[in-house]
Image: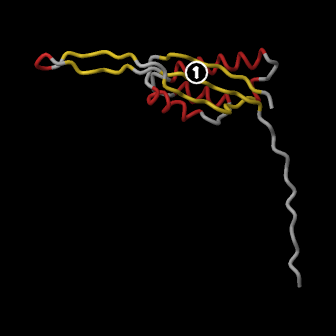
Amino acid sequence: MAESKAVLKSLRLSPRKVRTVVSLVKGKSVSDAFNILDYAVKRSALPVKKLLISAVANAKSQGLKEDGLYIKDIRVDQAQTLKRTRPASRGSAHPIKKRSSHIMVVLATENPKPNKKVKIKKAKE
């Protein structure tokens, strides 16, 4: 089973928001994932779609065909957090955490499972 992967680092969207879109396409075929991402109404859908396009291009350069690919693994990890402050009442400051994400996608060719022959045991009479 051949695999290809692509990584997107330091996407300026919080991992929690990106995971909502990623969970929609996990385990799907590439063509189904593109259809889902076209109609997803989330800001993180476009970067995930671009990453998927990149992973497909990597797979084609390895000699794999696009129609047999599926998303084996797609993971969103937390990247660096930018720490900022916001002025608050009475001269104090409140912290603001601007979170970022790393996304990794692994594509694999579909491995058709061989049909298992089921042995039927006859009941003893």
Q: Please, is residue 86 above or below residue 31 in the view?
A: above
Residue 106 locus on image (x, y percent): 67, 27
Left or right of 99? Residue 55 is: right
- In this rendered view, identify the residue nearer to me: 81 or 123: 81
Q: Mark 1 points at which residue?
A: 49
Residue 118 locus on image (x, y percent): 85, 60
Q: In which quarter of the image is residue 83?
A: top left
**Which quadrant does the C terminus fall into?**
bottom right
- In this rendered view, identify the residue nearer to me: 4 or 65: 4
Left or right of 78? Residue 121 is: right
- In this rendered view, identify the residue nearer to me: 35 or 121: 121
Residue 39 locus on image (x, y percent): 52, 27
Residue 120 locus on image (x, y percent): 86, 67
The amino acid pointed to by label 1 is Lys
Left or right of 64? Residue 23 is: left
Q: Please, is residue 40 above or below residue 6 in the view?
A: below
Q: In which quarter of the image is residue 99?
A: top left
Residue sitting farthest toward the front: 92
